Image: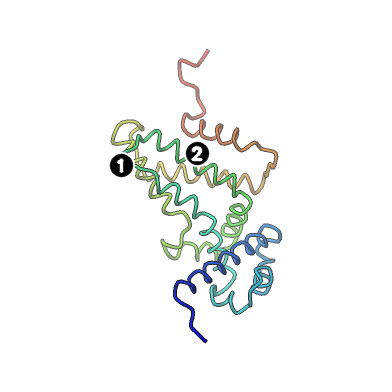
Amino acid sequence: MPRLSEEKRAVLESMTREALYEAAVGILQDEGLQGLTMERLAASAGVAKGTVYNSFRDKKEIVLFVAERTMEDMIRDVQDLDVENGDPVELLEESLELLLHHLFEKRKTLSAMFRIISEDADMRVLACESRNRQPGYEIREKMVEIFRKGVSTGQFRPGDPALMDSVLHATLHGIIHEFIFHSREETDPTAAIAAIKDLILHGFCPEEKDKP
């Protein structure tokens, strides 16, 4: 029997992992971490249980895979921002638009990931064991670049770019937290994104000229 070419093998592996991702997302959203077993995942994805074990050691590794896969589009879009040639203020606004759009679009899956990782001590350790396994670190590096350029050009207030990123990161985590505990399916994403962007970019207090 002829052996599969490396290209075909890669395609099959990619299709299998995509099927596992879609199945894992469905299980996590419907049943949470308790419902995610190797047997359940294999059955939902339509693959043999051995195939699941070939890809993942345990279900916690699956959760990290889902978190990373869910954020791939978000990471790619932010990494495409041209910090070297762009205006820092415009870059910050554009990055917020991208990040908030993805957060609203994928809020159910991200909420499940956030809950699982934040409530399980083993998951927190596993997520931080390696810098390369920490979902979204590429986004944070890009945001630090934007803040650093804004500070250096005088368009942002003087400050530590890493601290600025930490404040923004905590804000976005807080938004995900709201999705978990105060989910509002009727919320208009467009209006919510505009309001959140305005608060982040301009703060809570009006400019002096806007005061009565």
> Which mark is first along the chain, 2 or 1?
1
Q: Residue 11 location, x and y as percent?
A: 50, 69
Vertical order, 41 against 1 (above or below): above
**Quarter of the figure with residue 163:** top left
Tell whether 151 sits left or right of 100: left
Residue 84 tag number: 1
Tell whether 183 sits left or right of 166: right
Q: Residues within 10 Å of mark 1 (few under 14, many from 20)?
A: few
Identity, as a three-letter code, of the amino acid under mark 1: Glu
Q: Dot 2 corresponds to which residue?
A: 97
Tell whether 82 sits left or right of 135: left
Q: Residue at x 49, y 50 (%)?
A: 74
Label 2 element class: helix
Q: Residue 40 location, x and y as percent?
A: 68, 71
Most extreme residue toward the left, as rendered?
152
Q: Residue at x 50, y 66 (%)?
A: 126
Q: Residue 174 location, x and y as percent?
A: 56, 44
Residue 191 tag number: none
Nearer to the camera, 152 or 83:
83
